[in-house]
Amino acid sequence: MFNNQLLNKSDLQKKLTEYLSSYNVPNSDGESQIIIAYAANKNLFIDVDFKYIDFKILQKVVFERVSGKPLSKILKQRGFWNHVFYTNQYTLDPRPESEIIIENILIDYNKVNKSNISFIDLCCGTGCLGISLLDEFRYSECNFIDISSEAIEVCKKNILNTGLYKRSKVYKSNLFQDFPKENLIKSDFIVSNPPYIPSGHIKNLEKSTLFDPILALDGGDDGLFFYKEITNYLYDIEYKGKLYFEIDPLITDQLIKFLLEKNVKISYKKEDYLKLDRLIKISFPFTD
Ligand SMILES: C[S@@+](CC[C@H](N)C(=O)[O-])C[C@H]1O[C@@H](n2cnc3c(N)ncnc32)[C@H](O)[C@@H]1O
């Protein structure tokens, strides 16, 4: 169907876009460019030379894509902030809406006159949040934590690919259970995008999300399991740093109710580019 009988790469891209659209693939124009670049072993469509496109690879990717598998899971990569991250069936694909977290932490810490920042990416998955921040704060160090051995391997690969291994430590741990307490106490902030889909809602998610691992999605009966565990633990140890949680409109109201009852301060709540609640910043009442 797609072969080198086509005259040039823009004809190919046009045909591929129409084909993907006919299968209701969203952003078919953008995805067709990514697929062609991938089949020519290039990062960007603009750099592709038509004669180097491998049509066998292209056909295979297109076949999987129209069967409903997300492109990031087929290519095992997804762009986030300034990098392309490796991802697979054991990790949540980095999402563009999470970039609002990076934007706001950058604003907060560019205002702070502190050269060495130590922070934690809790429930790190691919490591997209911690790696993006490490890259922005040149003198920072990050501790990455995830319970999944497979996700930990993916995170390590991304740390290596981005050359940030000297300022990174990676821990396999159930939340803070096997994480050194002294590292926690000295950290300036924690960023976390924990699993937050209420268990009963998982079956109703759109098909593409179901290619992400359940371990990365399931937030317990009300979706708040991890938020409560993390906040309660930090409260109990009288944590002095800040806590940034990715959130979702599904759980925002209940989460805010819990936080107010817990007597922690909500420094702010931010929306993403779709005007959906996406980030909450928390301070504990133990700051010096
Ligand atoms: C929603 S994903 C977030 C991944 C990544 N931070 C991001 O924003 O794309 C949640 C992650 O939490 C991890 N996780 C689930 N339960 C955990 C636990 N008890 N302790 C630590 N990590 C956990 C999952 O393996 C998954 O990688």
Image (cartoon, helix red, strand yellow):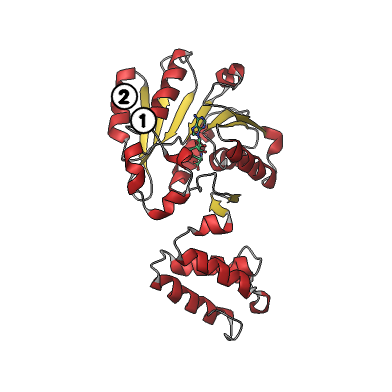
Residue 253 horizontal/vertical position (percent): 28, 33
Q: Nearer the viewer, residue 83 or 106?
A: 83
Q: Residue at x 43, y 36 (%)?
A: 195
Q: Nearer the viewer, residue 4 or 144?
A: 4
Q: Residue at x 56, y 35 (%)?
A: 148
**Tally of numbered tags:** 2
Labelled pair 2, 1 in contact (Cβ < 8 Å): yes
Mark 2 packing: few (<14 Cα in 10 Å), some, or many (20+)? some
Q: Earlier in the sequence, mark 2 or mark 1?
A: 1
Residue 287 horizontal/vertical position (percent): 46, 16
Q: CA distance from mark 2 to mark 1?
A: 9 Å
Tell me if 164 is positioned left or right of 283 in this view.
Answer: right
Q: As shown in the figure, which amino acid type bears the numbered disc 2?
A: Phe
170, above or below 241, in the image:
below
Q: For mark 2, what is the residue?
A: 258
Q: Nearer the viewer, residue 229 or 259?
A: 229
167, above or below 54, in the image:
above
Q: Is residue 275 visible?
A: no
Q: As shown in the figure, which amino acid type bears the numbered disc 1?
A: Leu
Tell me if 208 is positioned left or right of 109 in this view.
Answer: left
102, above or below 209, in the image:
above
Q: Nearer the viewer, mark 2 or mark 1?
A: 1
